[in-house]
Amino acid sequence: MSRLAVVCGGSRGIGGAVALLLAERGCRVVVLSRDQDSARAAMEALPGGDHLSLSCDVSEEQEVQRSFETIQKTCGSVSYLVNAAGINRDSLLLRTPPHLMVSMLHTNLLGSMLTCRAALRSMLRPPGGAIVNIGSVVGLKGNAGQSVYSASKSGLQGFTRSLAKEVASRNVRVNLLLPGFIRTNMTEGLEDSERLIPLRRFGTGQEVAQAVLFLLESQYVTGAELLVDGGLHLSM
Ligand code: NAP
């Protein structure tokens, strides 16, 4: 039987590449994002049939709950969850309005907590599954102009480690992937930053997706943090 994989933020960018790779590897994929049309278009482009797309704002508890109830009813138990839904607005703290702080924390941190909570209900019966949260090298190293974004991503580190401890006895593994600069909508116009990267180029969504697949499939890896950043952390 094929595995059911839910990819939050699967309509484009890193999540889009993850959805594609998982579908290529035979998973049945659920693509989640706020915009219904782009979630559906991404889902329809996946190889194989029987995939699903849902419009869901991961920062809204009721929407998350409703979506995972629909997934359980329509497709059954979730095997894999990938949290790639995220937003970033670069801004010095003094210039960051509180509503922007709330939306970054709610989408990047609370959103992953809500989807993990909803997916776990289905992963624990019968026990087993794997979760990959997408953090950032910035959550590890910090960056001027990204204090709130960085806080949301650092929060994912404590969350991932703690949740890994909570659910390991039920054979659910929880890992964190830390990308550097990856070529997506989020990094448009930042090409100058290439000089900061030891490998001298941005990564691709496919390269991150390969690492996500490794974490999903590695049966003896949990609570781990994997940097996929072309060595950027070495120079920050
Ligand atoms: P992206 O191309 O902008 O894609 C973001 C995805 O998240 C889209 O599918 C978007 O769809 C979805 N999304 C945003 N807010 C959402 C919400 N509230 N509820 C549900 N879905 C939501 O960004 P990306 O570069 O692929 O980034 C993916 C993840 O990697 C993010 O967590 C980001 O912080 C992290 N990351 C990216 C980089 C990079 O260099 N690109 C580096 C480090 C970490 P809708 O807009 O339709 O909702």
Image (cartoon, helix red, strand yellow):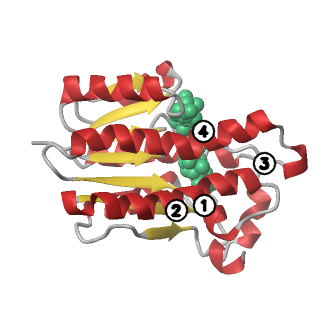
Give the x, y percent position of residue 134.
Answer: 50, 54
User: Are the two marked residues, 2 and 1, in contact with CB atoms closer than 8 angstroms?
Assistant: yes
Distance (Cα) linking label 2 and label 3: 21 Å
Residue at (39% x, 24% y) in the render:
54
Residue type for callout 3: Asp
| Residue linked to disc 4 | 106
Q: Are marks 3 and 4 in contact (CB under 8 Å)?
A: no
Q: Which residue is mark 3?
A: 90
Mark 2, residue position: 157
**Image quadrant in which the N terminus is located:** top left
Horizontal and vertical percent position of residue 65: 38, 27
Residue at 35% across, 62% down = 164
Disc number lying in front (2 or 3): 2
**Is 53 left or right of 230, judged from the image as shown?**
left
For the residue marked with disc 4, what is the amino acid? Answer: His
Image quadrant where residue 186 sits: top right
User: Dot 4: what SS?
Assistant: helix
**Upstream in sequence: badge 1 or badge 3:** 3
Question: In terms of secondary structure, where does tag 3 sit?
Answer: loop
Residue 7 placement (x, y as % from top left):
39, 40
The answer to whether the residue bearing label 4 lies less than 8 angstroms from the nearest atom of ligand 1 is yes
Distance between the alpha carbons at the discs numbered 4 and 2: 16 Å
* Position above or below: 203 against 55: below
In the rendered structure, the answer to whether residue 215 lies left or right of residue 88 reads: left
The earlier-in-sequence mark between 2 and 3 is: 3
Of 206 and 112, the residue lying toward us: 112
Residue under label 1: 154
Mark-to-mark CA distance, 1 and 4: 14 Å
Quadrant location of the C terminus in the rendered image: bottom right
Q: Few, some or many C-alpha atoms within 10 Å of disc 4 (few <14, some 14-19, many ≥20)?
A: many
